[in-house]
């Protein structure tokens, strides 16, 4: 069995103070994908670099306190690749990939466009650049799991207030169509939705810090594990962990009938 966890930390140092590493120690995770670590390597404690039982690999942003992705694994990868070959987004630390045999696991953090029109344009640039990457990944003939914060709610079922968000970043028609194309034309699988096609509120992984969004479960499902069909078909369980709160996102846990 292979358990993969994905979590946007909204700051690794902040998440550490909220019990993240005690919780991780209680899990059976083989691979943990982290997004928005908001730190650089010198900022990390030994526990943050490599929690007990895990090795750690990171792709940090050049800008301090911003973005960045990481990956913990119990088994050392055969190879680790940082970045997607785009200077603008590689400087922001948005992609890290680990390979074991015929399986690759990626920690991915798409830009958010909610802060300004300029950032939305950056998000569209990322999507335009990354789509051919999705094509090439499928063409490799490997099994791949793309974990992360995609910053897009795919369908109406994926957020509470879909009607009022149709013109907002994260639920724009162009963003949703881009994901649909990845699924329907390229054959990528939304693993959580494969197992839970009709789940609404339990599926949410992010809540605004405004008002009582989390208390009232006014959430969005924007964190995914999107996989190639072979490994996706082995997924046995998928859940969102909400008992403890490590960030404004919740961990997505999926178990695959797979061995590294």
Image (tube, helix red, strand yellow):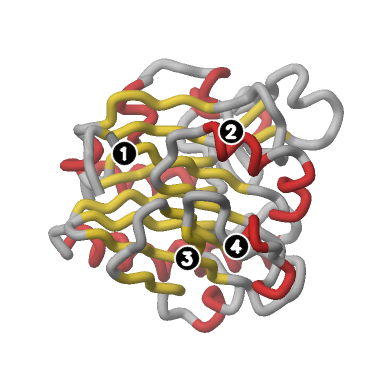
The kind of secondary structure element at disc 4 is helix
Q: CA distance from mark 2 to mark 1?
A: 21 Å
Q: Residue furthest left?
A: 141
Query: Residue at horizontal 19%, vertical 60%?
Result: 101
Q: Earlier in the sequence, mark 2 or mark 4?
A: 4
Label 2 close to label 3 by CB (< 8 Å): no
Q: Earlier in the sequence, mark 2 or mark 3?
A: 3
Q: CA distance from mark 3 to mark 4?
A: 17 Å
Determine whether, in the image, residue 43 is placed left or right of residue 121: right
Label 2 close to label 4 by CB (< 8 Å): no
Query: Residue at horizontal 31%, vertical 39%?
Result: 2
Q: Is residue 245 above or below residue 179?
A: above
Residue tagged 4: 49
Q: Is residue 38 above or below residue 222?
A: below
Residue tagged 2: 205
> Does any portion of residue 257 appear in the rendered image?
yes
- Disc 1 or disc 3, which is closer to the eye? 1
Q: Residues within 10 Å of mark 3 (few under 14, many from 20)?
A: many
Closer to the camera, 83 or 211? Answer: 83
Residue tagged 3: 95
Q: Residue furthest right?
A: 211
Q: Earlier in the sequence, mark 3 or mark 4?
A: 4
């Amino acid at each position: 069995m292979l358990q993969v966890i994905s979590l946007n930390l909204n700051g690794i140092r902040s998440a550490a103070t909220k019990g993240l590493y005690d919780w991780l120690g209680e899990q059976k995770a083989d691979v943990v994908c982290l997004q928005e670590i908001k730190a650089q390597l010198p900022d990390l404690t030994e526990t943050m670099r490599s929690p007990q039982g895990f090795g750690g690999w990171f792709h940090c942003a050049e800008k301090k306190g911003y973005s960045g992705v990481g990956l913990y694994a119990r088994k050392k990868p055969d190879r680790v690749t940082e970045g997607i070959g785009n200077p603008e987004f590689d400087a922001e630390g948005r992609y890290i990939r680990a390979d074991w045999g015929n399986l690759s696991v990626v920690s991915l953090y798409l830009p958010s466009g909610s802060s300004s029109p300029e950032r939305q344009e950056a998000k569209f640039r990322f999507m335009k650049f990354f789509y051919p990457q999705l094509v090439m990944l499928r063409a490799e003939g490997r099994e791949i799991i793309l974990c992360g914060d995609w910053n897009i709610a795919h369908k109406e079922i994926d957020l509470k207030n879909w009607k009022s968000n149709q013109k907002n970043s994260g639920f724009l028609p162009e963003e949703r169509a881009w994901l649909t194309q990845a699924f329907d034309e390229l054959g990528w699988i939304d693993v959580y939705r494969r197992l839970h096609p009709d789940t609404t509120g339990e599926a949410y992984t992010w809540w605004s810090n405004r008002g009582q969004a989390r208390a009232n479960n006014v959430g969005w499902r924007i964190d995914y594990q999107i996989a190639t069909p072979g490994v996706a078909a082995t997924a046995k369980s998928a859940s969102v962990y909400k008992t403890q709160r490590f960030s404004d996102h919740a961990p997505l846990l999926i178990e695959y009938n797979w061995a590294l």
